[in-house]
Amino acid sequence: MTLPGVLILFCFAYLPMFGIIIAFKDYKFDKGIVGSEWVGLKNFKYLFSSEDAWRITFNTLFLNAMFIVFGLIAAVGIALLMNEVKVRWLNKLFQSALFFPYLLSWVVMGYLVFALLKMENGLVNSALAAVGLEPVQWYVDAAKWPALLVLIMLWKTAGYYSVIYLAGMLGISQEYYEAAKIDGASKWQQIIHITLPLLVPIMTIMTLLQIGRIFYADFGLFFNVTRDTGLLYSTTDVIDTYVFRMLRTVGDVGMASAAGFYQAVVGFILVLLANLIVRKIDKNNALF
């Protein structure tokens, strides 16, 4: 039964790893991967010698860390609220409404955000004007975008992750809650002492998996939602969008591959370190 999954993983995750050698070559389309000249670490040197290297690395790590922390809080919070909705049809309605944004592409989300934030006739600026406040030039002020990107990411993904945590809550035996009620525990005390502790294994696994991709930015979010606006690069430009622009303008496939290899290695190391820390605290919650 596992054979189809193993074959898919092998074909799409392991066979393409042969292309890693492009990161160490001066890739030429006419010569191909094997025939291109070896250049050692030249592509990595070019990537890290750029004056933008620190900025894009910091933005990638900082924003993804914000997504992980606030995403976990929002998803667990939504799941706790959904768990208290006892009317079945209303529960399904809320789940569908919260899950729906996850199904939308970042292109569609980009247009929705633009409709909200555009300077003229944007819904947000129209609301500000209605209460006597000055409109904001959102696509000029880079300082506001880290918070905006966190809110947009939560809008799209919090509902999806909340379903995972809600499924974990539904698996908790009701006997725990009944015993707590007999002892006079309030609803908040039941959440603190029963629900959250029993969700820790799921929360740990989800967080470890996300840490593994902390060096990978969601290209659709950072490219489509920000509309690739140059004035916002100081806070929204990440490794993926920077490499895409370099590949599009310069056509340096080797440098783009070096960046991808760098992201994969660092992500792997971060997963190992995070899992090691979890094992030191409680080995039962570790991923491996």
Image (spheres, rainbow, N blue to C red):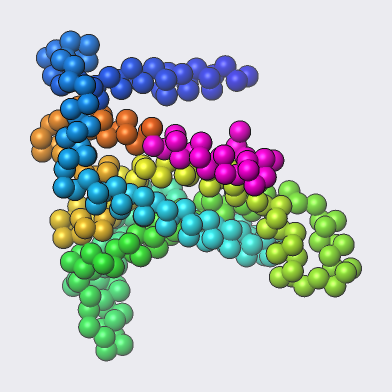
Q: Nearer the viewer, residue 50 or 213?
A: 50
Where 57 falls versus 249 (above or below)?
below
Is 4 on the left-hand or right-hand side of 32? Answer: right
Question: How many numbered dots are placed on residues in this image?
Answer: 0
Q: Main secondary structure of the magenta part?
A: helix
Residue 279 lies in quadrant: top right
Towards the viewer: 182 or 210:
210
Q: Is 286 included in the stretch rendered in magenta?
A: yes
- Image quadrant in which the N terminus is located: top right
Say left or right for 108 vs 10.
left
The residue at the point 77 percent across, 72 percent down is 186
Q: Is residue 106 left or right of residue 75?
A: left
Does the magenta portion include 269?
yes
Q: Which residues are magenta?
A: 266-288
Q: Residue furthest front?
A: 280
Quadrant in the picture for residue 42: top left
Q: Is residue 225 visible?
A: yes
Q: Which of the 4 image quadrants contains residue 156?
A: bottom left
Query: Which residue is outermost to the bottom?
Result: 132
Q: What is the x, y in percent for residue 262?
A: 32, 34
Q: Residue at x 64, y 62 (%)?
A: 80
Give the residue displayed 13% in from the left and 31% down from the top. Answer: 251
| Residue located 60% across and 37% down the image | 287
Q: Residue furthest right?
A: 182
Q: Is residue 253 visible?
A: no
Quadrant in which the C terminus appears = top right
166 or 116: nearer the viewer: 166
Q: Position of residue 223 (x, y in %)?
A: 25, 49
Closer to the camera in the image, 181 or 119: 181
Q: Position of residue 126 (x, y in %)?
A: 26, 78
Question: What x and y, as percent, mark residue 161?
Answer: 54, 51
